[in-house]
Image (tube, grey):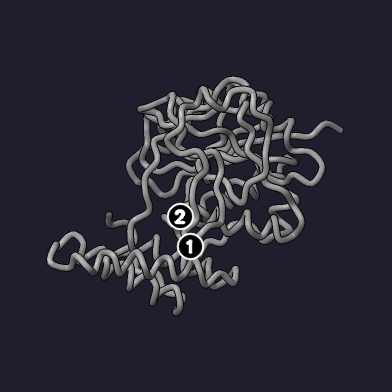
Amino acid sequence: MPERTGAVVVHHRNWPGVSDTLHALLAAPLDRVVLVDDASGDGSAPAIREAWPGVEVIEQAANLGYAAAANTGLRRLAQTGCDTALLVTHEVLLDGGAVAALGAALTGDVVAAGPLLAYRDRPEVVWSAGGLLTAPPEHVGQGEPIAAWSGRPPYDVDWLDGACLLLRLDAVAAAGWLDESYFLYVEELDLLWRLRQAGGRVVVVPAARAWQQPSFAPPYLQARNLTRFARRAGRPDIARSVLRLAAGHLRHARDPDQRWRAYAMLRGVLDACSGRLDRSRALRR
């Protein structure tokens, strides 16, 4: 039987902007599109359901973060017979051939594939061409012209940006799904690390193109989640890189902005060790 591919859109208060994402997905070779609304509470979920009858809208009862919403959608696709799932965030724009190009790369021991991601406000500039588990983890190709990547074949990376990636659902289920305790940021790095530990490969497909407007992790979540991952993966070098960054902010402690960033990061490190999540600090940038 041919494989069935669905898409999961993680959405939070981006109506009507998410329509651009949905328009591209419904034009792609997909068997099902599921949008998981992360408790927006602003009327956007009913509006999306009415405007896009071809999209299944699932409303979360509470905002439990990206991983929880993504897992809800991924499990729904698995329940409805999908073999692979394209996971995207609500602001991503997909090139017309992206889904087909990613699907063609998902063969053999490849369990995850991602596109070449560029900035929406600078569409000719690369935001992410995959990532490496350096200390701290870094994006490949960031800031390079997208034209320079034309014709390059798929290649292996350590991780992909969670804004857009195609996953083999049986491998994700076997790995234990996304870890919802991260709340936001680093959970895709953690999942892809576990998939690779199980023998799977993670690749970037330069022929597949997508655009997003990235945001950077708040200091508290950056420190908490990278430290949490470093402890799980046995990577003290990554944990040390977090402390170096916090120390760099402390060196400019007379600056109130630098001081709160340092304190937020140090609190994040402590909370990573205790398993705590401080929601009041989590989204402050």
Instruction: Please give the residue where the numbered disc 1 appears in the rendered image.
Output: 182
- In terms of secondary structure, where does tag 1 sit? helix
Q: Residue at x 67, y 24 (%)?
A: 29
Taking the view exactly as shown, the residue that stands out farthest to the right is 1
Q: Name the image quarter holding the C terminus.
A: bottom left
Horizontal relation, residue 262 to residue 210: left or right: left
Q: Are marks 1 and 2 in contact (CB under 8 Å)?
A: yes
Look at label 1 and name its amino acid. Tyr
Residue 195 in which image quadrant: bottom right
Considering depth in this image, is 116 or 170 the residue closer to the camera?
A: 116
Callout 2 crowding tier (Cα within 10 Å): few <14, some 14–19, many ≥20: many
Instruction: Please give the residue where the numbered disc 2 appears in the rendered image.
Output: 185
Horizontal relation, residue 115 to residue 40: left or right: right
**What is the CA distance from the residue labelled 1 to the residue labelled 2?**
7 Å
**Residue 250 screen position, x and y as percent:** 24, 69
Look at label 2 and name its amino acid. Tyr
